[in-house]
Amino acid sequence: MSVILPCLNEVESVAGVVREVEDALRAAGVAGETIVVDNGSTDGSAIAAAEAAARVVVERRRGYGQAYLAGFAEARGRYIVMADADGSYDLAALPAFLDALDAGNDLVMGSRFQGRIAPGAMPFLHRYIGSPVLSGLLNLLYGTGVDDAHCGMRALRRDALPRLHLRMPGMEFASEMIVNAARAGLRIAEVPVDYRPRTGRSKLHTMRDGWRHLRFLLLYSPTHLFLIPGAVLFLVGLVLLVALLPGPLQLFGFSLDIHYMVLGALLTLLGSQIVALGLYAKTVAVALELQPIDRTLAILRRAFSLERGLILGGVMFAAGLGVDASIAITWFARGLGALDEVRPALFALAAMLLGVQVAFSSLFLSLIDLQVGRTG
């Protein structure tokens, strides 16, 4: 077992944590090593860790994720345990992590909420707002089913690392690990871990690091960020656009007229653009192996081809152009006089713009596949 401790100016605690690791390894009856990844300390942390018999790895690129990636590259154990060098985690829980890995789990998360959180160990905002909200969002978007997604003590099988595709350099590395584990179909378990007040000054920045986690969760899920909101806007807009094409409507005591049709055209075009951006994002992510193909993209790939996209876009554009042509014929037939054809003109405008977007989106998606295929 390899226990990895990222370290940035933790001279007051790192030696004690290294000794605590050794005690926990002996209690678990397992051979192991302690790796301290010095991430730019200026207070002698690396010396203190080495004197406590840890193997020190220097990673000059700053960042929580960078430190762990450097530690993973040096780890020799079949199992890898992640913890902090500030003394906040009770490493007596290590045998429970070992048992969970022996039981066949690939990633074992510590849960501070299932263990004991000592007074003063976790700020109020983190305990009752930040961690629950971010963990809940992660579970909602990715179905991971963990109640403490940001616990820093966790363990994993070494042979599972290649399937995690870990890249994030900062604090969002913690979320990336869980998301990629769920996407790769790895078995995830949780064990209780006690959480203590840390030694020294915290490196966490509540707003900045919270935003980085939230940003990662949203950007890493084009389906929820783009496709679902875009599809909702598109459908609502299309219903308004089509329903109001014949004339005004009375609905629940409200009169829906041309202004709602304009809104429908806007929502239709806006929604289709957002959906297109989502498809671009998913295609690029799969092409760069940042995420596997999901059901949405699999269905699209079975149904989509460049030729079908061009035909569909052409038909939509031609339909809009045909409506505009009929309006022009009517206008000429009336001697170029007054013309009241706003509804069909608005419908034609939306159809033509959608047609152009579908055609060029098809070209762009095909271009991505072509370029990645050539460079891959």
Image (cartoon, rainbow, N blue to C red):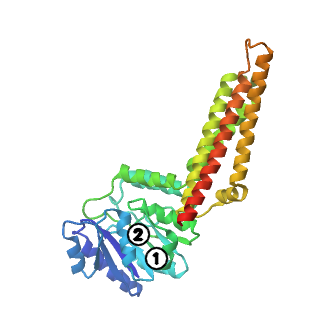
Q: Amino acid at mark 2?
A: Met
Please tell me whether mark 1 sits on a helix, a strand or a loop: helix
Residue at x 67% of width, y 39% of height: 354
Q: Which residue is mark 2?
A: 153
Sequence order check, earlier mark of 1 and 2: 1
The percent position of residue 59, horizontal first and vertical second, equals 30, 69
73, 191: nearer the viewer: 73
Give the crowd class for mark 1: few <14, some 14-19, many >=20 residues within 10 Å.
many
Q: How many marks?
A: 2
280, 360: nearer the viewer: 360
116, 57: nearer the viewer: 57
Q: Amino acid at mark 1?
A: Phe
Quadrant in the rendering for residue 262: top right
Quadrant in the rendering for residue 143: bottom right
Placement of the N terminus among the 4 image quadrants: bottom left
| Residue 310 seen in this snapshot | yes
The percent position of residue 156, horizontal first and vertical second, equals 47, 75
The percent position of residue 73, horizontal first and vertical second, equals 39, 76
Rendered view: 162 above or below 284? below
239, 279: nearer the viewer: 279
Residue at x 39% of width, y 50% of height: 125
Q: Which residue is mark 1?
A: 97
Q: Are marks 1 and 2 in contact (CB under 8 Å)?
A: yes
Left-right relation of 219 to 227: left
Rendered view: 234 above or below 144? above
Q: Residue furthest right?
A: 333
